[in-house]
Amino acid sequence: MTAAARLVLLVCALATAASPLPLSAQRAASPTAASNSQAATTARIVTAAKAVVTSLDEAGRRKVQFPFDSQQKAKWSNFPSGIFERDGIKMGDLTAAQKDAVMNLLSVALSRDGFQKVRDIMRGDEVLKTTDGGRGGPRGGGRGRSGPGGGLIFGEDLYYLAFVGAPSTTDPWMLQFGGHHLAINLTMAGSQATMAPSLPAAQPATYAFEGRTVRPLGRENDKAFALINALDEKQRGQAILGYRVSDLVLGPGQDGRTIQPEGLKASAMTPAQQTMLLDIVREWAGIMADAYAEPRIQEIRGSINDTYFAWSGPTINGSAAYFRVQGPTLVIEYAPQGSVEHIHTIYRDPTNDYGAKIAKR
Amino acid sequence: MTTGRRLPNGRNTLIVVALVGLIGAPLAAHRRDEYLQAARLDMTLTRVTLELDLTPGIAVADSIIGDLDRNRDGTLAKLEKDAYAAQVMSAIDLELGGRVLQPQVNAVTFPELAAFRRGDGTIRIEAAADLPSLPAGDRELFFRNRFRPDVGAYLANALAPQNDRVTVLAQHRDPDQRELTIDYAVRGEPSVGLPWWVTGVVAALALTTAFLLRPRVALGG
């Protein structure tokens, strides 16, 4: 080999070594079994979404479909119908077969636990319709109130489905499903997906159904109380905020904002405590289908040392306490609305809300 | 001066634990009869921007509408909106290191009056103040909201700075979040230079070239 050739080879090697793209990122870009699984999940969701479209008449098709770059993406809320008017197809307007198609779509798009959580939240709203569970509620939420035209505010019929962008295995689109105390915004782009921002909430937070006690956000609550009580005094001193937090800070309408993180940094937690923290995160990140959720949880695990856990309120389970988990790609807030029976939560990824990172065309 | 308004961290925590029990009672009945006032503060090198979202609960909506719609004609004229925003801002204190700042309102948005009665009406006010020119170093920004304390429920947060020369060091609040002190640091301008890896490649190239082109001595056999 000539000196000149050796020089060229050396320059190439040095340039590669000096590349700002880490090797791990280069490896991640190659096709893997995981991304195949994610692509297969997207394909199943697209099939189920198309089945919904096929089941609709022309008017229904027009109602369910929105352009990907439309404002519909950000049109979601914790409020019930009558206060906040949603677009899309309304469950109460669908036939039994059409409802089945929608629920099948959700069961494919969400994990088993995630789908159950959605069902429990919707069923809770049905309970609210028939009881005075809204009595202690927030702005709006009382019994017997009715929306414009006298329609009921609460109930399982008042949930809406919309497709923002046409269901596709390659192009970005969003499955949006929501109603009172629920906003699922699942953006897919080929094999990638994000469920940020989404808002699972509950009122009543505990109710009886077919002889069993249902707590739609019970695991979130219990896991957080377990973690705050697993911290030592010094850690708890850092985690507990010195003030009352009366609502979500980054709830609906707060897209694009990132607040300064506070609380206990997970780098100051033991491995066991970090595992507990990730287990809390899983309650939100794990709502979407497992194939999407696992890489998301790995991503959050990768930045666990830069993730914070903050708490405001009593530390005895059964009390109303606010908590927040915040990392470079994550914000979770859990905010009781005056009592343990009325909970709002939010899940965000400040780098990837509405698929900002994955949906670039 | 802002020093003395905040409590040491450890004391804060103890007080919170004690307050939590006290908070429990009003917490159980808040929302409908409260006026949620959420403030966010965004610091840059030269200015601070305040975003304020004001959302009255249903039970206090008529009182807020009464303050807003002065002529009771059922609509909000620009004059009425401006007057209300000025009233809000007159109850806001903002100081940098004890120096009083005068934030100017940049934008206000008001919902329809009916939205207040539904409970989802939010007034948004954005105001900003230029910061005095100061050398690099630590800063202390103090914010206080004195607006409608009779029904107010408050949130106050620093936004994560977008400029990497600005770093939030700590936030201190009173238990109701009516007061927020933000300790932050401003770094000096970094010296202009090439990225480290470019410097490394150039240095390695120079060494390699020198090695390959070095004078060689023929070895005798």
Image (spheres, rainbow, N blue to C red):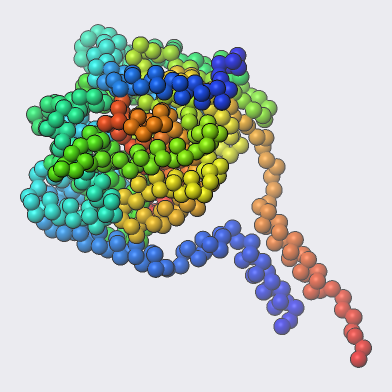
* In the image: residue A149, left or right of residue A313: left
Compared to residue A110, the image places residue A154 above or below, namely above
Residue at image coords 30%, 46%: A185
Compared to residue B52, the image places residue A260 above or below, namely below
Q: Nearer the viewer, residue B221 or A337?
A: A337
The image quarter containing residue B202 is bottom right
Residue at image coords 30%, 40%: A218
Compared to residue A256, the image places residue A361 above or below, namely below
Residue at image coords 52%, 18%: B94
Q: Nearer the viewer, residue B212 or B141?
A: B141
Query: Which residue ends up furthest to the left in the rendered image?
Result: A95
Query: Which residue ends up furthest to the top in the rendered image?
Result: B71
Residue A310 percent coordinates (x, y): 46, 35
Image quadrant holding the N terminus of chain B, namely top right
Image quadrant holding the C terminus of chain B, namely bottom right
* In the image: residue A321, left or right of residue A122: right
* In the image: residue B190, left or right of residue A239: right
Q: Is residue A29 visible?
A: yes
Residue at image coords 29%, 14%: B64
* In the image: residue A187, left or right of residue A315: left
Query: Which residue ends up furthest to the right in the rendered image?
Result: B220
The image quarter containing residue B138 is top right
Residue A244 percent coordinates (x, y): 42, 24
Q: Is residue B129 visible?
A: no
Query: Which residue ends up furthest to the bottom in the rendered image?
Result: B221
